[in-house]
Amino acid sequence: MSATHSKPRLHNAMWPGIVGKGPDSTEPFIDLDTMLDLTAQAEVNGQQFDGVDLFMSAPHTSIDSTDDDLKVLAHKLQSRGLVCGSFVAPVWAPTGGGSAMGNEMEVRKFLEQVRKACVIGRKMTALGVRPSGVIRIDSATGTGDWYKDPKGNTDKIAKTFCEAANIAEAEGQRLAAEGEICWAGMHGWDHMLRLLEKVNKPKTVGFQADMAHTMLYTLGYNSPESRIVAEGCATPEEIMTALKKVTKALRPWTFDFHVAQNDGTVKGQGSHDKTGRHCPPDDPNGLMDIVKVAGLWMRDDNGVPTRAFEHICWDGCMFPNDVMTDPQTWNKVLKVMIDVRDAHGWN
């Protein structure tokens, strides 16, 4: 069956093979080749994934990759008929970065990780395997310290993001700040909006919307003052209404979009803080009509497709490994991604 629309391209996230996995978890890492193979082999009515979004961190892709390393990576993609898109920059202390609202040394480490990711992004585009994508960042620190001085700490994060923007612009890149409830100053939809407005670089620093995380924005997890859906009223209908408010505020800033499902709970695994629970697309406890909610991000207030995203990405972060390595998982994911594109895409 031919595709209704050809755009946006459909990508699968590779970091679920790393995040919440490894020595500090009950489950081992899933290597990049396995993740690429599972993605490339998925097929629904003759349609396949177009590409992947990558985590610039070992054991997948080192942030210190050489030019030869990147050529090997490009070959891995090309040999499977895939491209790459957005990159996660490893800005956190355990991976060599530091807090965006930290001391001078921490901020310097944060910015250096952003610089390295931007350089890799530029080089992968030059190698012909990255037609679109942004560099994803967050504040790289938890919410507890932020509440000690909300305004002052948001100002610090904004200053760091402004410096990161200068680095990104020099490399021809854009940055997308991840809207996830575990990151300071970004843990409520209204806090996220204020941070973006304070940075005030709308062409370079925008928002990365993940449906599993932005759904929790409406419930006020980690930010009770930001709650929209009243406690005990987390029905799909109430959440859909609340998300209209969130998307209206943040859609104009959104550079990068993840399709996902959420059951309204939070989950931590390994070293990763508790955050939005990513569920399989057919999870009976999922609280979103995936296609309809995706439309809130992919269409404007008048219902017209914005064409803002050259590609969209599925995020199955912290799925159990037995689910991750089941080929049927990715056929189900691909099916819902095709449904989203058929409903809100373009040619």
Image (cartoon, grey):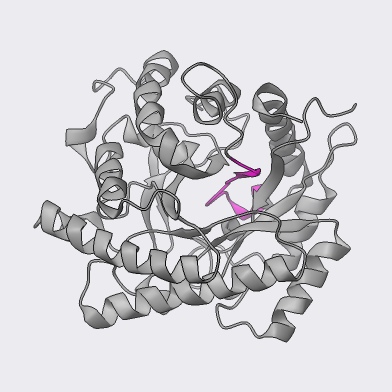
Q: To which quarter of the image does residue 280 belong?
A: top right
In magenta segment, residue 310: yes
Could you tell me which quadrant the N terminus lies in? top right
Q: Is residue 149 above or below residue 101?
A: above
Residue 220, can we see it?
A: yes
Q: Residue at x 27, y 20 (%)?
A: 232
Residue 219's spot in the image, x, y percent? 30, 30
Q: Residue at x 29, y 41 (%)?
A: 193
Left or right of 284? Residue 164 is left
Relative image position of residue 99 (x, y in whole percent): 29, 69
Q: In this view, which residue lies farthest toward the left?
A: 148
**Residue lying at the far top of the rendered structure:** 237
Above or below 271: residue 292: above
Residue 321 location in percent, x, y? 63, 55
Nearest to the observer: residue 321 or residue 174: 174
Q: Nearer the viewer, residue 107 or 164?
A: 164
Q: Is residue 184 left or right of residue 242?
A: left
Q: Quadrant of residue 69?
A: bottom right
- Note whether residue 57 is visible: no
Q: Give the number of callouts.
A: 0
**Quadrant showing the C terminus:** top right
Q: Where residue 67 sits in the image (x, y, percent)?
A: 69, 84
What range of the chain is rendered magenta?
A: 309-323
Locate residue 192 relative to residue 164 in the image: left or right: left
Q: Is residue 181 magenta?
A: no
Residue drawn at x 28%, y 63% is 141
